[in-house]
Image (spheres, helix red, strand yellow):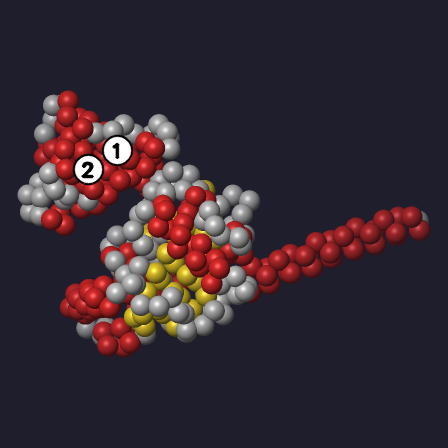
């Protein structure tokens, strides 16, 4: 009887211990909440991220957009104001001045506070440039325990980007989609056995507070969307190269037959032929064996037919 009671007490103690550990873990997971934001790179992605954060996330204490020149920052501010004016036409209560006033435009990497700070890198899709930036950030914020680093890369391996980062449990991929203010999805890229659950939970909450939807994925080439989308676009180019059908007919077929909002060639023009080539070249250099090089795409990029942004791609605009 005594032995039974002791065993019963032991089981009860074990259950209580597990419950206490669960509470402790839950407290730790909820302990980190993004309060300050620094976005480096004021192009379409960087400016879009801060616009969405300033417009929707009411829990942020500060938002800083950084770039190397005042000219780049002025263009970013102008773009943000243009975007908000379009939103105001549909939502009259949009206070443009109030939203823009939440953003600090700076040529220095100087957040308002390092307390629960999220730093998102949104510079050019160049591995060497990103690695050097994170090397500098790693040194600059080495004594700041509540800083999370995130890369917005769309095609590079996040682990490669973070080559010089020491605190890998607070490194993550945050892949926003263009145009950021309109696109609801954010891929949260978790580096296996490195990104902590606390970091992931904090990023999922941050994305939610921006009014967006997150999906979790591993650090694999292309993550989810581009891993499926890029081969699809390149197969469409191969069909065109073989003469199977015209670009217009392929687009029409995929829109009316598969229900896609855009055909593959309309999509490539929107993304940019140069961007598509860059992704292809990067994957080929890593021998991922996901897609094949396109002679037609290379020729079009060489001729400056880069897509909608320049008025000429597979279509003329």
Q: Is residue 234 left or right of residue 166?
A: left
Q: Position of residue 10 (x, y in %)?
A: 82, 52
Q: Position of residue 81 (x, y in %)?
A: 20, 69
Please give the label number shown on residue 232: 1
Looking at this view, is 33 or 67 the one in front? 67
Residue occupying the far left of the picture: 316
Find residue 117 and report its horizontal and vertical position in percent.
46, 66
Give the camera-side residue of 130 and 177: 130
Q: Residue at x 93, y 51 (%)?
A: 2
* Residue 210 point in image, percent of width and height: 36, 62
Q: Mark 2 = which residue? A: 264
Q: Secondary structure at mark 2?
A: helix
- Residue 80 visible at all: no
Name the element at disc 1. Answer: helix
Q: Earlier in the sequence, mark 1 or mark 2?
A: 1
Q: How many other residues sit within 10 Å of disc 1, few (<14), some (14-19) or many (≥20)? A: some
Residue depicted at 59% across the width and 61% down the height? 28
Extreme-right residue of the structure: 2
**Residue 106 shown left or right of residue 295 in the figure:** right
Which mark is drawn over residue 278? none
Instruction: Determine the image quadrant of residue 37.
Output: bottom left
Q: CA distance from mark 1 to mark 2?
A: 8 Å
Q: Is residue 58 above or below residue 297?
A: below
Identify whether 314 is placed above or below 47. above
Determine whether 7 is above or below 278 in the image.
below
User: Do we see residue 110 in this rendering?
Assistant: yes
């Amino acid at each position: 009887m005594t032995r039974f009671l002791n065993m019963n007490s032991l089981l009860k103690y074990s259950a209580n211990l597990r419950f206490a550990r669960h509470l402790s873990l839950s407290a730790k997971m909820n302990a980190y909440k993004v309060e300050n934001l620094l976005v480096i790179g004021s192009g379409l992605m960087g400016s879009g991220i801060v616009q969405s954060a300033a417009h929707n996330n009411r829990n942020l204490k500060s938002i800083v957009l950084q770039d190397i020149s005042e000219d780049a920052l002025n263009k970013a501010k102008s773009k943000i104001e243009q975007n908000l004016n379009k939103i105001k036409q549909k939502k009259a209560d949009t206070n443009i001045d109030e939203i823009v006033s939440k953003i600090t435009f700076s040529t220095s990497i100087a957040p308002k506070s390092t307390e629960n700070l999220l730093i998102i890198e949104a510079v050019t899709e160049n591995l060497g440039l990103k690695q050097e930036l994170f090397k500098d950030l790693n040194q600059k914020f080495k004594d700041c325990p509540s800083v999370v680093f995130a890369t917005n890369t769309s095609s590079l391996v996040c682990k490669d980007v973070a080559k010089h980062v020491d605190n890998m449990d607070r490194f993550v991929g945050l892949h926003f989609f263009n145009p950021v203010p309109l696109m609801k999805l954010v891929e949260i890229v978790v580096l296996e056995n490195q990104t902590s659950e606390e970091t992931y939970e904090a990023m999922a909450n941050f994305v939610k507070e921006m009014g967006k939807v997150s999906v979790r994925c591993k650090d694999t080439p292309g993550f989810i969307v581009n891993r499926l989308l890029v081969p699809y676009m390149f197969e469409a180019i191969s069909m065109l190269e073989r003469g199977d059908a015209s670009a217009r007919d392929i687009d029409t077929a995929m829109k009316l037959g598969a229900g896609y909002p855009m055909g593959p060639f309309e999509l490539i023009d929107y993304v940019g032929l140069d961007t598509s080539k860059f992704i292809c070249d990067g994957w080929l250099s890593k021998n991922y064996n996901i897609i094949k090089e396109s002679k037609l795409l290379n020729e079009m990029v060489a001729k400056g037919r880069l897509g909608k942004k320049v008025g000429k791609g597979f279509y003329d605009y």
